[in-house]
Amino acid sequence: MNTQTEQQLENALINQLETLGWDRVTIADEADLVANLKRRLEIHNKTNLSDAEFKQVLNKLARGNIFEKAKILRDKVDFSRDDGTTGYIELINQVQWCKNQYQVTNQVTMEGCYKNRYDVTLLVNGLPLVQIELKRRGLEMKEAFNQTNRYHRHSFSAGYGLFGYLQLFVISNGVNTKYFANAPVQRRDFKQTFFWADRDNTKITQLSEFADAFLEKCTLSKMITKYIVLHESDRMLMALRPYQFYAVEAIVERVQNGPKNGYVWHTTGSGKTLTSFKAAQILTQSPHVHKVVFVVDRKDLDFQTIKEFNSFQEGSVDATTNTGNLVRQFSDDTPLIVTTLQKLNTAISRERHLKTMEGLRDKRMVFIFDECHRSQFGDTHRRISDFFQNVQMFGFTGTPIFAENAAKNALGRRTTKDLFGECLHKYVITDAIRDENVLKFSVEYIRTFKGKEGIEDIEVEAIDTAEVMEAPDRLEKIVDYIVANHDRKTHGRQFTAIMCVSNVKTLIAYYKLFKAKKIAGEHDLTVATIFSYQANEEDADADGMGIGGDLPDDSQPVNAHSREALDSFISDYNARFGTNYSTKDGKLFYSYYKDIGKRVKNREVDILLVVNMFLTGFDSKALNTIYVDKNLKHHGLIQAYSRTNRIMGAKKSQGNVVAFRNLKPATDKAIELFANKDAQEDIILAPYEDYVAKFEDAVAKLLAITPTVESVDALVTEEDEARFVQAFREVIRIKNVLDCFTQFDFSELPIDAQSFADYRSKYLDLHDKVRSDKEKEKVSVLNDLDFEIELISRDKINVSYIINLLRTMRDKTPAEQAKTRKSIMDVLDTEAQLRSKKELIERFIAEHFANLPASADVGEAFDTYWADEKRQAIEALSREEALKQDGLEAVIGTYLFTEKTPMRDDVIGIMETRPSLRERRSVADRVIDKIRTFVETFIDGVD
């Protein structure tokens, strides 16, 4: 039996959509699209538009980029009627989202730079709001994703730009189906495409099942009107994932139907802030809710959450800088308040605030508590519950408190259910790993001493005493291990690490060891530290669950020695980064706290040493490793491990946990508690030997396609080249996992390091060929493949590496020089980051290096050459594209600072002559590509 063709898949989907209430309409081109839009808007608005009136509406619809069009969609379009009065056209009914006009069409042809025909388009009130792209069964989903990117470049902006109103894309090969929000093509990522799921997180992958669950007209329009967030600071659309959708629905339904509380268990790293924002936003629109109060328990999250909430909707939150402001916000018309638990407690406890707050006791309000596993189990929660008589409380947590992991306090052992009632929705760590929203963990248990007769510490719990665990020899061995293996764990420091230890005394010893070894020249790692200098800092480690208070409390006793040591370490930090922090007052310390977190995220700190700080609530995608020398268990263990498993590109294949204590029983227990008893293999990476076996299988498939490196050049068709790309890409992916194991050794694998590098070079050659073809806008099979170049980039192999090779070459014999030159050429061929620089580096070697005086410094000569080439490149780009040079330099500077691709409007703003509306998108995208190439060539990987 033949496999289902793409056309058969398309026909079956359209037939199914008709049964779901979509009216089929034939739209061949933009003229049909515009005529249909006029009729649908007239029906929806119960009016008739003259040609002149509709022309005004159409001209207003043509304005703006994707983000601005999303705002226009949610607003009303004004126009001048023929009789001089003002009329308004509603584009979509957001309140009664089922009361819209629904149509499905296929094979619409649009012509911009090139002509394209789109598969299936869903129209709401005549506007194309959902585009569905299909591939026949067996093809990669990424091909459909990349095809939508081509449509963006080629034709979505054509004519009146009505396809700029697309809110969602759906891609499918019949077996797998995913959705994602519309965004500028340069800011789209396949990792931001999602499967839909049912309430129990069972994925819905088949296209027909997805259509029933997601594309039913009322469900889809509710998703568009309620569950797409317009992210203000990034100026892009974000679509909620299914578990976020169900959690918000559950909270809103509970508020609408009664006074009960509840909590949401969504694992760490699953986007709880966005979920809670959307719940809060919808609840503030309810006439029955007086205020929504979002409560956090830490100063940094107070600032961070306000910033994130306002980035979702500008001005949605007013910052509460002190308790007086908080009390004023409770009494004014502020609909959404973000505050800390401590300030809320003060507002209902202090005499001077009670007069104002008393009038709010009976107001119906909703309180949403972030990370409610941490701070909701004391007197404060009881005081809030007792004070407010008509509030509903909802908690969000990644690690709930159950009877098994509840700590005993004055109120007994309180669980999350005791405080908030039933769990409204679950999305546990196994769900998140399966959906690729977070990574698995690779856990290595490292033996740090031997008992009598060779008994290992991993087998003997009783040996785990302070005397042994804090022995100087043991600590030094651990530091030596980290120094030797840190680059392997972090892929040549493309990522960073955190190290948690049992108490401040041990931390001080570790820091001094790292510092002494750095002074001795044994490593060049940047190690920084932060800890609370209060007398009871180490007590939080007693039960292995507590994460401890993050910031010092001035009312608590201080350990003078710890504070003195920390000030010394902060002095090292100040010298390293040119800052001026200390522990002299809370404000300076808090500034240090924020700055060190920022530098970890920016990869300026290699290892952050802590006792309890930053082990919960700290999200850094660039952090991939945690070294553990303290006892952890239950929620404390999962929270600490989860610092490492945020998604960040293809190179970050897992979160690395290196345990210098016997944490395996605690790890197994925590996984059982917070996932399920069968979750071990879903959360922890398989053993090294399993990945060797997978690597062997992947290499066998590669060699079946291309038995030798030379045979890559003999591939005849693009389909054959695509098979090679896919096969070698899988080899790279598995090797990236193997790289992080300390026992990794090419000699045990079926391909040696040189052959791997040679195949990598051929892989990059094909990538360069496709890039060249894209500049000519050639459409090919390879165009829609994702080469995932980041898989094979290595930050350590950069321009500085080449300069150092040239320095060593100067004093060598001609034969040795030739060998070094060949090594340099090999590196330029096989390292992704250097290929864009290859021609320039070769020219420097050929034209400048040989003629350098003996006294000249190679690095300085190269810097001079590079600066001149960079200047010429900027001048050439300015001249070729008619750009203002100072404006171009400013755009590039902003790009480097924000790491966000320049916006089209910014690029158009520096043009000497603005292109026509029809040409703007294609011209701006061409310039943006050239800016990206300039940065890749002259700045990335150049120290």
Image (tube, rainbow, N blue to C red):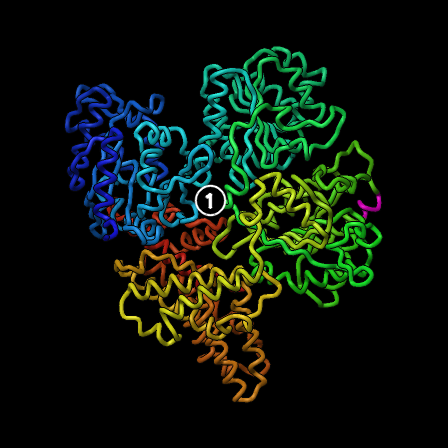
Q: Residue at x 27, y 60 (%)?
A: 780
Q: Quadrant of residue 856?
A: bottom right
The C terminus: image quadrant = bottom right
Q: Which residues are magenta?
A: 560-564
Residue bearing mark 1: 435
Answer above or below: position of 224 versus 451. above
Residue 912 visible to an observer of this rendering: no
Answer above or below: position of 325 versus 608. above
- Give x and y (percent) for residue 615: 66, 43
Name which residue type carries label 1.
Answer: Asp
As rendered, which of 805 and 287 lies closer to the eye?
287
| Label 1 Cα crowd, 10 Å radius (few <14 / some 14-19 / many 20+) | some
SS majority, magenta:
helix
Relative side of 472 to 179, left or right: right
- Exactly how many numbered labels are in the figure? 1
**Numbered disc 1: secondary structure:** loop
Relative side of 685 to 377, left or right: left
- Give x and y (percent) for residue 492: 57, 62
Relative side of 719 to 861, left or right: left
Q: Residue at x 52, y 55 (%)?
A: 653
Q: Is residue 345 magenta-colored?
A: no
As rendered, which of 93 and 633 lies closer to the eye?
633
Q: Residue at x 15, y 29 (%)?
A: 51
- Give x and y (percent) for residue 320: 60, 27
Answer above or below: position of 801 versus 459. below
